[in-house]
């Protein structure tokens, strides 16, 4: 992998996104709007917001990064941009890493805004450090970026990319422990939830919610989410086609 080519790819993607205000708004503002809406849905029951707000602070960035990244990458594929780039002396790893860096930079802004709004604007009550909450939110957003880059290789149109959300995101959303503790599920579903990265994203947020210090479980959850993001990025580079079908 060549650092200069990776950074050049990231800069090109950011320049293109700068001229796409709708995608920027979706990436940065939608998680904040959803948290704001959630806070006032539970206006009469602030404890409910405290109990699920931290989990959704990780889930909302993951979903939006997945959606925008998959569509933006597919748009470059269908327009022929990716094929022209890969005809140059540019390794697949350089290309995937460049995209990951570009969207990762936006993920940092998104996670910082959503975390700040939840803690200081909406009064989310957490026992642990705000920095730990931000760290998990950022890891979740990077995981969403990695998943979006990966699934874009299997879609032939933007409509198909959107269709991957029910297949990739919704099962994780149902099994991550947000609606019911994972150990209360049917054994088969509990076992399945144990291999889904969103489960550890929610567990990591809950550790910050309940414990004032860094726990072994928190470290485990953060490492698993980060490792899943790296693994999915590697799979994305391996499945990247040099020719557009």
Image (cartoon, rainbow, N blue to C red):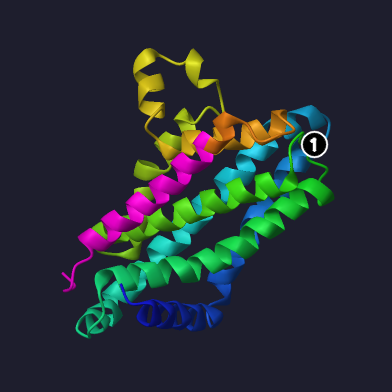
Q: Quadrant of the C terminus?
A: bottom left
Give the main secondary structure of the magenta stretch.
helix
Quadrant of the rendered image containing residue 26: bottom right
In the rendered structure, the answer to whether residue 208 lies left or right of residue 8 reads right
In the image, residue 174 sits, relative to residue 159, either above or below, namely above
Q: Is residue 244 magenta?
A: yes
Viewer-side residue, 160 vs 217: 217
Q: Secondary structure at mark 1?
A: loop
Label 1 crowd (10 A; few <14 / some 14-19 / many >=20): some
Nearer to the camera, 61 or 39: 61
**Residue ID for mark 1:** 125
The reply to whether residue 237 is in sight is: yes
Q: Quadrant of residue 188?
A: top left
Confirm whether residue 160 shows in the render: no
Q: Residue 6: image x %, image y %?
A: 38, 76
Residue at image point 53% right, 27% down = 177
Closer-to-camera residue (80/99)? 99
Q: Quadrant of residue 146?
A: bottom left
- What is the magenta range? 220-245
Look at 34% across and 42% down and name the residue there. 167
Q: Is 8 positioned to the left or the right of 41 in the image?
A: left
Measured as percent of width and height from the top left, residue 74 is found at 33, 68
Q: Quadrant of the N terminus?
A: bottom left
């Amino acid at each position: 992998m060549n650092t200069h080519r990776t950074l050049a790819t990231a800069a090109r993607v950011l320049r293109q996104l700068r001229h796409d205000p709708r995608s920027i708004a979706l990436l940065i503002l939608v998680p904040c709007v959803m948290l704001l809406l959630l806070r006032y849905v539970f206006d009469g029951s602030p404890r409910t917001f405290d109990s699920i707000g931290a989990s959704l602070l990780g889930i909302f960035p993951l979903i939006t990064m997945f959606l925008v990244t998959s569509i933006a990458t597919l748009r470059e594929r269908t327009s022929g941009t990716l094929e022209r780039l890969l005809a140059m002396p540019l390794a697949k790893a350089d290309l995937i890493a460049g995209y990951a860096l570009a969207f990762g930079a936006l993920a940092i802004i998104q996670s910082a805004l959503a975390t700040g709004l939840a803690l200081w604007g909406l009064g989310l009550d957490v026992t642990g450090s705000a920095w730990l909450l931000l760290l998990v939110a950022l890891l979740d957003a990077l995981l969403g970026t990695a998943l979006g880059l990966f699934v874009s290789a299997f879609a032939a149109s933007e409509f198909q990319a959107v269709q991957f959300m029910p297949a990739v995101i919704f099962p994780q959303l149902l099994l991550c422990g947000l609606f019911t503790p994972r150990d209360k599920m049917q054994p088969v579903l509990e076992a399945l939830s144990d291999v889904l990265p969103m489960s550890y994203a929610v567990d990591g947020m809950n550790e910050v919610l309940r414990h004032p210090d860094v726990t072994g479980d928190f470290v485990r959850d953060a490492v698993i989410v980060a490792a899943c993001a790296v693994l999915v990025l590697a799979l994305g580079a391996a499945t990247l086609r040099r020719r557009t079908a």
